[in-house]
Image: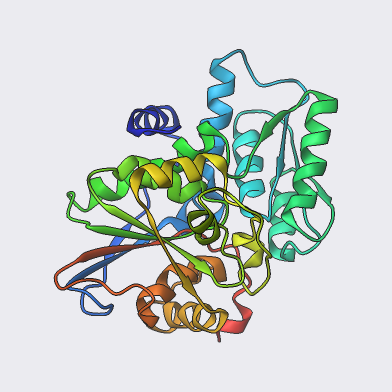
Amino acid sequence: MIALTDVESAARRITGHVRDTPLVEVTGELPGARAWLKLEFLQHTGSFKARGAFNRLLGAAEDGGLPEAGVVAASGGNAGLAVAHAAARLGASAEVFVPLTAPAVKVARLRELGARVMQVGERYLDAYRAATERAELGGALFCHAYDQPEVVAGQGTLGLELLRQSADEVDTVLVAVGGGGLIAGIAAATEGRARVVGVEPRTSAAMHAALEAGRPVDVPVSGVAADSLGATSLGGIAHAVLGRTGAESVLVDDEAIVEARRELWRRHRLVVEHGTAAAFAALRTGAYRPAPDERVAVVLCGANTDPADLG
């Protein structure tokens, strides 16, 4: 279980290794009296994942050092990029397993960061199984994309940062959900201070299904955001934290995600992934309707995408 103290500890550990990303007010441009966009896609490697990766690797270094075999990760792309970046900064080798469906732009960037890239299977689960086997056989440190305590606590530092930047004026945080590491971390960081709402594509709704079933369950995965929100089940840590904090879930269609991504470019000149645009789509479509005078922050969590279709 992750609590505020774990997130605060992570914030101290990763200071100097990650960026404070801007919080931009867009009141009047979105439903609700006040609204902000948290530009986390400006984080190292283009997503929030650097926070959790650094906390995982730095924590391991404190506990006795990183293994000579380096680190291994499984990823749809963003988590692998973060692990490769953190490993390079800390002088360790990295091997990243990705599904064959991983976007070419992410695979190319992984190699630029010095990671050895292994493409396995059609789904994240296939890459995950191959990565865990490699870590067990070779003695490397395994870095989970979303379901390790250090990773979740690291992602939660975004929530602490958001509250500080808004002077605790945010009532609700909207965040896209894949395996649940980011929303769980934010929920732990903001517990008792802000409500957290997860946004998922209807075609990849692991959090929604887990809340309905009362436990993580396998879900089918497809759609435009499957590369970043394509976890087949919610992480166990996320399920525990979200149940404790009462986080909510809303769903959006692929068409709404595509249009939200285009709108972020047209109106704000922001280039984000389809998965990231899901959170913005929830406000645009009314999937989430703020109450009068509600103060809402939308987390824009990743931008490792090909912008060619935004012209």
Nearest to the observer: residue 69 or residue 170: 170
Nearest to the observer: residue 240 or residue 19: 240
Answer with left or right where residue 29 lies relative to residue 129.
left
- The image shows residue 74 at horizontal and vertical percentages of 71, 45
Answer with left or right where residue 273 lies relative to residue 297.
right
Nearest to the observer: residue 280 or residue 184: 184
Q: Is residue 5 above or below residue 238?
A: above
Taking the spot 38% from the left edge, 77% from the top edge, the residue there is 268
- Whether residue 288 is visible: yes
Answer with left or right where residue 251 lies relative to residue 65.
left
- The image shows residue 216 at horizontal and vertical percentages of 58, 49
Taking the spot 61% from the left edge, 83% from the top edge, the residue there is 309
What is the quadrant of the C terminus in the image? bottom right
- Whether residue 19 is visible: no
Q: Is residue 232 above or below residue 257?
A: above
Name the image quarter holding residue 114.
top right
Name the image quarter holding residue 135.
top right
What is the quadrant of the N terminus in the image? top left
Taking the spot 69% from the left edge, 59% from the top edge, the residue there is 106
The residue sitting at the bottom extreme is 311
- The image shows residue 82 at horizontal and vertical percentages of 60, 45
The residue sitting at the top extreme is 64
Q: Is residue 140 above or below residue 107?
A: above
Nearest to the observer: residue 217 or residue 100: 217
The residue sitting at the left extreme is 293
- The image shows residue 128 at horizontal and vertical percentages of 75, 45
